[in-house]
Amino acid sequence: MTSEEKLVPPEEFPFPFTPYPIQKDFMKHLYLALEERKLGIFESPTGTGKSLSLICGALRWLLDHEKRERQQLQNSIAELDTKKDDNDGEDTDWLKQQVEQVKITQQRQLLQLQLNKILRNDEKLEQLRKRKEKKIERNFMKKTENVKQEVENDQPPANNSTADDDADILLEDVIADADCEESDPENEDEKYKGVKVYFCSRTHSQLAQFVGEVQRSPYADEIRLVSLASRQNYCINKTVQKLKNLSLINEQCTDMQRKKKSKTTVADKGGKTVKKSKASSGCPYFQQRAVENLRDEALLGVKDVEQLVDLGKQLSACPYYASRAAVTDAQVVVVPYNTLLHKNTRKACGIDLTDGVVIIDEAHNLLDTIGHIHSSEVSGHQLTHAYSQLIQYRDKYRSRFSASNLLYLGQIIFIVGKLIGMLGGKPGCSPVESSLKGVDTKLYTLADFVLSCEIDNMNIYKLLEFCQNSKIAHKLHGFAERYHPAVVVNTAKKTTQQQTGIRAFLKEISSDNIASPKEETSATPTVPEITTSNPLLSVLSFMEALTNHCSDGRVVCSRQSTVGRGSLKFLLLNPAAHFADIVKQARAVIVAGGTMQPLEEFRDQLFLSAGGTIDRLYEFSCGHVIPPENILPIALASGPSGKELDFSFQSRTNLVMLNELGRILTNVCNIVPAGIVCFFPSYDYENLIYQHLEKSGIVSKLQLKKKIFREPRKSGTVEKVLSDYAASVRSPSSSGALLFSVVGGKLSEGLKLQ
């Protein structure tokens, strides 16, 4: 058979405009890194068109690779046919000839099977392209009316019995349940699984920018792209959206898939149901045909999250499940950090990185992000609330639970009680009770912590699997919402112990102006927290953190004056441990950013520590597209009045320094035309500087020369502020603008201002 043909980077890449030389170099090196299965570190300064270079370089390689794969299959099959014909004509031993014929036939069948998958996939996509939009429009009004009716009919009946009301919050026996999601009727083995490009960035706005670049690129009509996002971004069911909390939205959504609604079609004279129609999903937007229609629309054109949500509302179909269903046939999958970097989330989204290409943009903070995603913290308040809810939940429904569910519940309650003990409390105590172990902070290895908790004999993996399959966190949240269970102090405690807790509580609130004892005794200040949050979710997240390798993290146990104020926090020390699967499975991994220095951090702490080899490493760094003669870097050692500038942490709030900075800005605004951007290390420091300049009258002086803009903290208003700034700079009637921005904010990450 023909060996794999080596792809050579082309001299020219399709580009929306004539690319700069460094953009050509970037695309050629990226093309080569993908072809040679490298672990690449690519550095390209902000403003050099890095995203567009990533798109055009990666997509050109992807299309060339698909063309090569198809051509090589056809060539290999032709070679085997020729070899088979030649073997028939040879005058050799008959038995040896037949053995050789069988081998050739088997090889050809395998190659033909793979080629058939590609051809079937091509045919399927061609059928999608030929679809008429009239079909969608014809069914649109009917579907919308049906959904409205289903939403109205989805309200719970008023006369249900208590037992029926509680059915949705009872634990079910956990067995292999593959009925949660609709399975694809097409056999997984028969599907064509080509190479996919997974593009990842930190925020949804950055991903939306990337999709916008793809839409403007020469590949917009050739590429099938799908954007993955959380249910919080994609859900169009208003009832579920009201939950706000992402974990609760996830569990409510999956729980609605479990609840199949059926309609009575035959009833006897007494009104008793005799026959029901086939069950459908509990969510009116999760209808298979509608979701498939939306999936096909997602594949027919490049769309970002907002565009897919709008289309989902038009078609009355769930964008979340449609986007997941489209992953199989997509060539480019756009995902946020949290989805790609968390193994369980990848699995839930159906992301298979095997032989895929992973491109992580804005990767300068990648190590910190991995550490943040896999770190976990649970407070004493959450532990005591979770313990109280679990106890009351178990006691209320003990007679209705199976033996296995009671066993698992008991084990979870046992672990939560032991975690409370680590904070100096006792199982069943109030969060305002004094800690029996005093105030201190200790650092534990995972092994030492598990032994200190006395939970080393518990199978945490099995418990987490039970919690996931049984949806216990969601059931418990429903129980808390319905019955509002308060945190109950253990009635078996001695009076002195109870008084200790009361004294601690009174001491805790002594600084507050609460005059009425009646209010103190009649109101339970912790109830609102219970009814508006789900403490078990934080507990389960911490339990999951305990399953990390012993050397990969540490547990910080912070004990405070009361149990509720204490906390347990898992800190991930080895981000590479959670990056190893990506390095192992993917064909190539590219991390790119404007400032990737020091490169050793990514090379040693990420790739090599994650199991990568030195021969796979590939580094590329380029200069800026702006010519050197257009750049004038100046470092100021002193201000206009001759004062030495010292903006170290100790001196940066000094009034002398702040006044000197104001004089510098005034002089710069008098000299520099058009736009000026002033970067600060943080939003807090920017606010401090601005408040001082405003009080001292410098802002008024600056506004005589430039219109002043400030980069806001909230991401929702950032783009408008920056576009207004750009408009003021370009306006011929304006003398320019001054923008106060923040390092690490939107502008510093290269937001386009056209």
Image: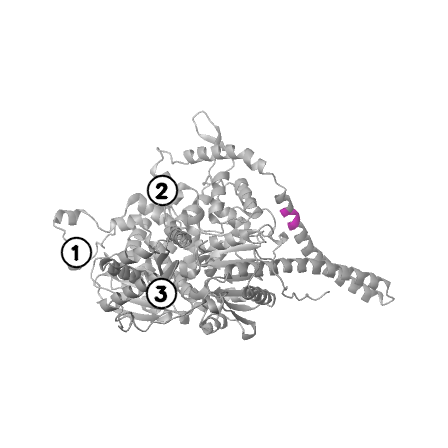
In the image, 433 versus 453, the foreground residue is 433
Q: Locate the N terminus and report the quarter of the image it occupies.
A: bottom right
Question: What colouring does the structure picture have?
Answer: one colour
In front of the other: 594 or 16: 16
Asked if the residue under mark 3 is in contact with the one under mark 2, i.e. CB atoms within 8 Å, the reply is no
Q: Seen in the image, is 111 located left or right of residue 695? A: right
Look at the picture and state if 727 lies above or below 378: above
Of 184 and 298, the residue lying toward us: 298
Q: Is residue 213 above or below residue 161?
A: below
Instruction: State the image quarter where residue 680 is shown.
Output: bottom left
Of the numbered discs 3 and 1, the one sitting upstream in the chain is: 1
Q: Secondary structure at mark 2?
A: helix
Marks 3 and 1 close (CB-CB < 8 Å): no
Q: Earlier in the sequence, mark 1 or mark 2?
A: 2
Q: Residues within 10 Å of mark 2 (few under 14, many from 20)?
A: some
Q: Residues within 10 Å of mark 3 (few under 14, many from 20)?
A: many
Would residue 422 be visible to someone looking at this image? no
Q: On the image, numbered disc 1 is attached to which residue?
A: 509
What is the magenta range?
A: 121-125
Helix, strand or loop at mark 1: helix
Image coords of residue 74 (percent x, y): 72, 58
Mark 2 is on which residue type? Asp
Q: Which residue is mark 2?
A: 166
Q: Position of residue 158 (x, y in %)?
A: 35, 33
681 displayed left or right of 224: left
| Category of crowding for the residue at label 1, using alpha-carbon neighbours closer than 10 angstroms: few (below 14), some (14–19), many (at least 20) | few
Residue placed under numbered mark 3 in the picture: 570
Residue 627 in view in this figure: yes
Q: Secondary structure at mark 3?
A: strand
